[in-house]
Amino acid sequence: MGKQRIILGLIAVLVLAALYVLLRFPVQLGLDLRGGSQLLLQVQTTEEIPSLSEEDLQGVKQVVENRVNEFGVSETVVQVAGNDKILVQLPGVNDPKDAERILKTTAQLEFRTEAANGDLRAQIQVREQERFDLLRALQEASAAGDPEAIAQAQAKLEAKQAQVNELTQQLYEKTGLTGKYLKEAFPSARNQTWDVALRFDAQGADLFAQLTQKIAGTGRTLGIFLDGRLISSPVVGAQYASTGIVGGTPVIEGNFTFQTANELAVQLRGGALPLPIKIVENRTVGATLGQDSIRSSIVAGLVGLGLVLAFMVVYYRLPGVFAAISLSLYTLWTFAIFMLVPVTLTLPGIAGFILSIGMAVDANVLIFERTREELRAGKTLYRSVESGFSQAFSSILDSNLTTLIACAALYWLGSGLVKGFALTLAIGICVSMFTAVTCSRTLMLFAVLNFPGLRNNIKLFYPGKIELASQ
């Protein structure tokens, strides 16, 4: 009797804890329920890769998936659509420009060495001065508020920048050291700004040492290019002429903020896109349909739960009442776990939750049928309840384990919404085992031991006609 009271106390504590979680933590909803951004990416061919294969699409998909996961966007969907497109869904990302910046940037990192070409360098300096003059003219036009002058200045500035980029490409020679040798990239604080620290693998470290040794002390710069644009051009000191810079841990200095440094590090860690992509569709998905879906799902869940509970009470009498209490606790605890993990709820996820409610009653059905068998065999009510639970446990464990194995396969091999369905179903299965074996059993034994009127009224447990053994 004392054991049942301890378990009932534990159940009460867990109920209070679940209520606290539900009041304290917000519900995480997926794209189909709370809205977000949906992008359709078209993978484009290049001279090196004139036609797309399944492996090419999977390579782009993997890079996009890595970037999205690094940014912490939950319950994303990244999947191949057709022969040259990839569909991306980002719940909670409501600014299309943010989504484009995360996905479209190729982040192709290259280290190049400056050629010994004084004429090109002089031309770049002239173009840079002209670009500076155009930038100042644009600022003056903006201050004057002249739209025509602003448009002309912007066009001239873009053309001049293109000239500078073209000459810079000619000045720096490729070395073969690219982002594919990159092992790690992370933001690094420097005074009031942020840099991006890099760490190469062994082969990349050797290449970096060789190219820095080549230009050390010559006055020629080391060009760090990102997506074909020069972002830094440090000079390698003469002290590195004998060995080069060893260790393979350079730093990109660009006066970054923490956000921009972290975004660049994420893009570099995610890898360069093996093929260029074009965003052919970028739309914001509203949550209007999601609210309707939530309401429909809640109604479906409540109706399903109500029908299950009604059947259990009508067919199993008092044990059905205990099962109804256990299922109500199961619903409360499972939803609290969803908030605590947190699980991002999508329509498939809610479907998995509702399905697990129906499956949760299976354990109670097995237990109650075993209990009836023991009653028909002439055992006392207390012994029948004990035997019913002990004999049904192996069957409950086997059935739930097989379902958990299926959930593990779906979660491991699936993606996006399939993972959400598998996770919610798996959590529901684990909680249902606890409620059936612990809550239902404790409530029935507590009632049998503490209420003689219930113990002597066998009709409350079994409507059939049997001879009850002495207690």
Image: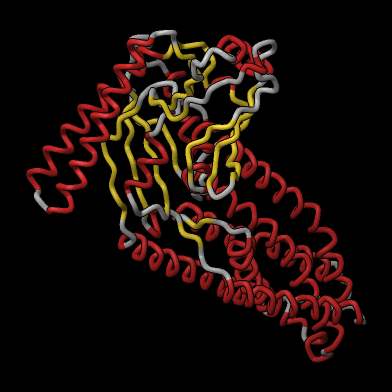
Q: Nearer the viewer, residue 438 or 88?
A: 88
Residue 221 visible in the snapshot: yes
Q: Is residue 235 above or below residue 74?
A: above
Residue 53, image x, y percentages: 40, 16
The residue under the point 47% across, 52% down is 348
Residue 202 in percent (x, y) is at: 69, 17
Compared across the picture, whether 10 is left or right of 50 comes to right
Rendered image quadrant of residue 167: top left
Choose between 410 and 263: the one closer to the eye: 263
Q: Nearer the viewer, residue 406 or 374?
A: 406
Query: In the picture, which quadrant includes the C terminus?
Result: bottom right
Which image quadrant for residue 216? Answer: top right
**In the foreground, 283 or 116:** 116
**Which residue is found at the position 53% from the left and 46% from the top?**
193
Residue 228 spot, x, y in % from top left: 38, 23
- Looking at the rendering, in which quadrant would you find the N terminus? bottom right
Q: Residue furthest left?
A: 148
Residue at the image point whose x is 42% and y is 23% from the top: 57
Color scheme of the displayed model:
secondary structure
In-image side of 139 versus 119 (left or right): left
Residue 17 in the image: above or below residue 41? below
Looking at the image, can residue 316 be seen? no
Residue 461 in the image, given as x and y percentages of width and height? 73, 77
